[in-house]
Amino acid sequence: DVKVTQSSRYLVKRTGEKVFLECVQDMDHENMFWYRQDPGLGLRLIYFSYDVKMKEKGDIPEGYSVSREKKERFSLILESASTNQTSMYLCASRRPGTAYEQYFGPGTRLTVT
Amino acid sequence: GENVEQHPSTLSVQEGDSAVIKCTYSDSASNYFPWYKQELGKRPQLIIDIRSNVGEKKDQRIAVTLNKTAKHFSLHITETQPEDSAVYFCAGETGFQKLVFGTGTRLLVSP
């Protein structure tokens, strides 16, 4: 049973703070992803990684960075949190190749005040 | 890059009715199209998918159809039940193993 976990379900931070969101998967998946989910906008890709030390920008990378030091862990970093980064953040993992199921974490609802 | 459009954004049906959600995609090279269901407060989960070499796939009350020529695919739910109420996302897979998601459809099934 694939499990993707995220470090927090709810997080409240102040403007300007550095924020770390952690994601861990236990299925040895090479591919990992970070999305943000906003009403009416669906799931938008922030960053993804094909393997350790590798990262690629998604559709909305501005204001974010990522770190993948171990295969099972993918971290999303908000260098200086802003109110427009208030959102639900979802991590996901997937086997490499085409047509494989993508598994999501439970999400972190981040509020920046 | 790939762009996936999804309609409608909201769909209300009576229990027992059918529901249809439609998506279009832009990249003719896309070859895998999954559908995810997200119940309130929960993570998205795969409910059905289809590959580009298949025109239709069924799993009990849900089915997906794909028209590659027109670049659109649809989710069909028959005999809807209140537990079908959720947000549904379609997606297309790009050549970079990324899924591009539609904006979601909120389905409400009333008893």
Image: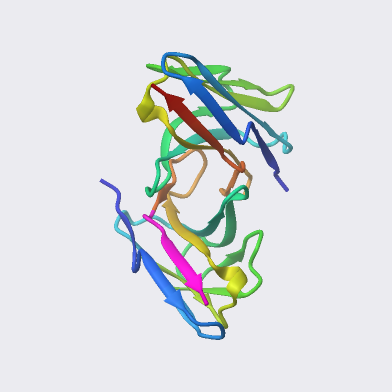
x, y percent for residue B18? 50, 15
Q: How many marks?
A: 0
Is residue A107 part of the magenta span, yes or no?
yes
In the rendered image, residue A19 lying in the magenta stretch gets the answer: no
Q: Quadrant of the C terminus of chain B?
A: top left
Q: Is the residue B21 above or below the residue A86 in the image?
A: above
Quadrant of residue B110 in the image?
Answer: top left
- Asked whether residue B102 appears in the rendered view, the answer is yes
Q: Between residue B111 and residue B78, name the one nearer to us.
A: B111
Asked whether, in this view, residue B22 is left or right of residue A49, the answer is: right
- Image x and y of residue B16, in percent: 42, 14
As drawn, the residue found furthest toward the left would be A1
Residue that protrudes farthest toward the front in the picture? B111
Query: Relative to A25, is A83 above or below?
Result: below
Q: What's the magenta region?
A: A105-113
- Tell me where residue B24 sits by quadrant: top right
- Residue at 41% across, 51% down: A104
Tell me what residue is drawn at x 35 percent, y 68 percent: A8
Please state which of residues A14 and A74 is positioned toward the viewer in this rendering: A14
